[in-house]
Amino acid sequence: MTPSKSEQAYELLQSKIVSGDYSPGYRLVLSSLAAELGCSVVPVREAIRRLEAEGLVSFERNVGATVASVDATLYLNTMQTLSILEGAATALAAPLISDETLAEARRLNREMEACLADFDPDRFSRLNIAFHELLYGSCPNPHILDLVHRGWKRMRAMRSPTFSTVPGRARNSVAEHDALLDLLVSQAPSAAVEAAAREHRTNTLNAYLAVAGLPPSTLTLPAAVHP
Amino acid sequence: MTPSKSEQAYELLQSKIVSGDYSPGYRLVLSSLAAELGCSVVPVREAIRRLEAEGLVSFERNVGATVASVDATLYLNTMQTLSILEGAATALAAPLISDETLAEARRLNREMEACLADFDPDRFSRLNIAFHELLYGSCPNPHILDLVHRGWKRMRAMRSPTFSTVPGRARNSVAEHDALLDLLVSQAPSAAVEAAAREHRTNTLNAYLAVAGLPPSTLTLPAAVHP
DNA sequence: ACCACAATGATCGTATACGATTTCATACAT
DNA sequence: ATGTATGAAATCGTATACGATCATTGTGGT
């Protein structure tokens, strides 16, 4: 079945936004987009409202829509939320992850290590996403995964600044991945897995906070204590 | 400024759904609703798509929309997500909660206790929401609060079965509230607050699971360990 | 030179219209 | 009686049209 025009419009606009083709602040004019997409304004409008609900677009009544810009506060809030949700998702997935999946994750982490030497931040970033996706992919609660995916989609528009702006962080990241994998291989208790996974993300967040010159206290949640 | 018609339609439909006026499965026909609301179908359609994005409405292409029904799995998944998010929100809010707020929360809990004797589940449920809202209301991360509110809105359509179906659970709930308040008053570490808040919700979830005859293992996440 | 205000243009919000798709009932064949 | 094809009715998806609203520019007054 051919997708509806509003679906097509949604997919296209979304991809242009997350790919950075339309950068934050770009004005989304209904009539122009309709002409560009070869349809009328109604489906375009629907697509834009959908993107607004997901936080990719800011919309103002009687004024128009622009590609949403992510300021530091929103970025940090979202990353903190993701650290919480991903930590829980990984812990819930832990008992369901197969040995093959763990081996695959380990392999991905070795590739990330190689990226450090090659200085390939783009590939590093993609591998990093794949690594975590692999781990919490077995999470039995699809609702949590949905929230995680939405959060990441929203963050993707803002180019992940971790690798380039925080020296040494990427190397620590790889080490933390290995530690997390060790916990999973040894079938550590859920609480320990959750704490490690959350801490890993929180460390990245804190590294960015330090660069931004913001105090970590108001935004960082101490990770759960290991048993 | 008078709200737009699509906004009006959204508000009205939402209230009718969460109030139970339109029950799950109720067919939402664009033209009928438009006539009922005194506007054309376009704003109604927009409102329905928004409600769909929030999970209050199920929508099928070329077929139509119905009020979303919440099955046991979705209910449990959402409650689990809420337990995680509310636990974190409460922990983040903990250092920011004023003494007056804590006193108010304690007072609410006494009222809930009174509801047990009067057997007033409706009031109990409302007080319960107010209680938790009060505690995590000071959470500095609005994104988390937003997700919590969305989750609750979605659950509200399904009448909370806790009080009536799980005997004794409500009384435990009151006791756990007091324990949580004690932790907050004594300025316990965030991890302890998070563990207690999450455990509280998880207990409710487990109670319901037991009633439904489902195994708790696949859906319950062991709460973080106290330090 | 600066501010208040009116006219203009761009854009949005919604009504209406109609083709497209699905659903349901009916009739027919097996 | 059951299953399948056919038609009509209901409903959705989208195009088009136009009034409403907002940003902006130009004009006059101080």
Image: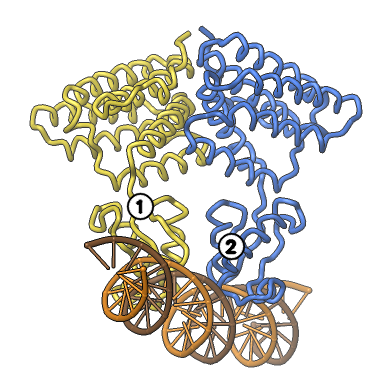
Chain colours: A yellow, B blue, C brown, D orange
Asked if residue A196 is positioned above or below residue B150 in the image, the reply reads above
Residue behind mark 1: A68
Q: Please tell me whether mark 2 sits on a helix, a strand or a loop.
A: helix
**Residue B189 visible in the shown view:** yes
Asked if residue A68 is positioned above or below residue D1 in the image, the reply reads above
Residue B63, by quadrant, is bottom right
Residue plotted at (16% across, 33% down): A164
Mark 1 residue type: Ala
Residue situated in front as seen by the camera: A85 or A23: A23
Residue B180, by quadrant, is top right
Question: Residue D23 placed where, x, y %?
Answer: 35, 66
Q: Which mark is residue A208?
A: none
CA separation, marks 2 and 1?
21 Å
The answer to whether mark 2 and mark 1 are in CB contact below 8 A is: no
Q: Please tell me whether mark 1 sits on a helix, a strand or a loop.
A: loop
Left or right? Give the position of B182 relative to A14.
right
Left or right? Give the position of C19 relative to B31.
left
Question: Residue B111 placed where, x, y %?
Answer: 81, 25
- Number of other residues with Cα within 10 Å of mark 1, as a class: few under 14, some 14 to 19, many 20 or more: many
Asked if residue C1 is positioned above or below residue B208 in the image, the reply reads below
The number of callouts visible is 2
Residue plotted at (36% across, 42% down): A152
Residue behind mark 2: B7
**Residue A1 visible in the shown view:** no
Question: Residue C5 placed where, x, y %?
Answer: 43, 73
Mark 2 residue type: Glu
Please give the chain letter of the residue carrying mark 1. Answer: A
Question: Residue A5 placed where, x, y %?
Answer: 41, 72
